[in-house]
Each structure stands twice: as C-alpha cells, then as structure tokens.
Amino acid sequence: MSSNIADLIEDYILTRLAEQQTGQVELRRTDIADEISCAPSQISYVLNTRFTHDKGFSVESRRGLGGFIRVVRVPFRNIIYQEMLDKIDAGTEFVEVKAMLQYLIQHQMISTRECSLLLQAVKSAYENMPPEPRVKLVKSLFTTLAELS
C-alpha cells in the first residue's frame, strides 16, 4: 500500500478527531473511501497499524450496513497505568514496583509525597503479606492512582 494513501487516511481520521471536543469520532468506512478514493481495506490497514493502543488510540469497528469506525484518543497516562497494572503479578519484585513509582514521579504523574507514601505501603505489603493479597493491594493502589489522575 502506498504510504501516501496511508498518510491521507491517517490525516483524514486525525482531522475529524481533532474537530471533536469529546476525544472520539465515529466515521463510516465508505465515507472515508469515497472522500480519499481508496479501498476500504486500505482504511483497515491504517486503523490496524497507526491507530493502535500503544499509540494512544482505541478503535471499535463494525462492518456491514450501519457499520462504523469509532476512534477514541486514550490519554497517555491511562496507557502507562494499564501497562503497569498488567506487569504486576505474584512474581513482581519490590524493586520493580519501586521502579514504576520512580517512573511516575520522574514524569510528574505523582508527587514526591505520594511516592513516599506508596513506597511505604508497598514495602510493608512485601514484608508482611503473601503474594496473592499483596498483588491485590498493589494493583488497587495503582488503580486508584489511575482513577485520580
């Protein structure tokens, strides 16, 4: 597929997304194809490669009559917190959780005070709790951070 067509499709979607105050846009594949003079499969390609979760987007697509494409810009913070939550399990060491908290403070996602409090809570959990309830507590702390940011 010509990168030029892919760029046009991406620009079209990003422009429509920017026009919306909600951070999401609902489009029809046929409208995009008619506007840009491309095949619907080219639109699918662009959605699958340029509008991924890793790049800060969520895409919902329904084909057929009444079909649509919903593109939502996911705040970058949500992606970071979700990746951290996905990494926390019974095998996660304290040093890894500490590194996650340091990342959050370095990127000004939490304050020094919050980091200190969380480190103490997590350290205590690692010293006094078996893995299963510890994971539940640590995930709960990170979920709360994500919800409050």
Image: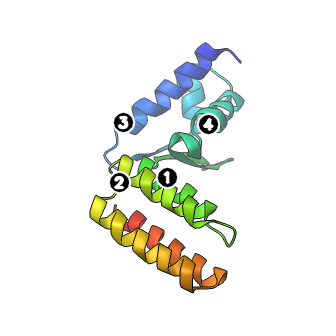
- Which residue has dot 1 on it? 80
Colour theme: rainbow
**CA distance separating discs 1 and 4:** 21 Å
Determine the secondary structure under disc 4: helix
Q: Earlier in the sequence, mark 1 or mark 4?
A: 4
* Residue appearing at x 56%, y 61% in the figure: 95
**CA distance separating discs 3 and 1:** 23 Å
Q: Looking at the picture, which amino acid does disc 2 mark?
A: Met
**CA distance separating discs 4 and 3:** 16 Å
- Which residue has dot 4 on it? 47
Determine the secondary structure under disc 1: helix
Q: Earlier in the sequence, mark 2 or mark 3?
A: 3
* Residue appearing at x 44%, y 59% in the figure: 101
Report the front residue among 75 and 13. Answer: 75
Mark drawn on residue 109: 2
Q: Looking at the picture, which amino acid does disc 4 mark?
A: Leu
Q: Looking at the picture, which amino acid does disc 1 mark?
A: Ile
Q: Residues within 10 Å of mark 1 (few under 14, many from 20)?
A: some
Determine the secondary structure under disc 3: helix
* Residue appearing at x 35%, y 72% in the figure: 117
Report which quarter residue 14 is drawn in: top left
Q: Residues within 10 Å of mark 2 (few under 14, many from 20)?
A: some
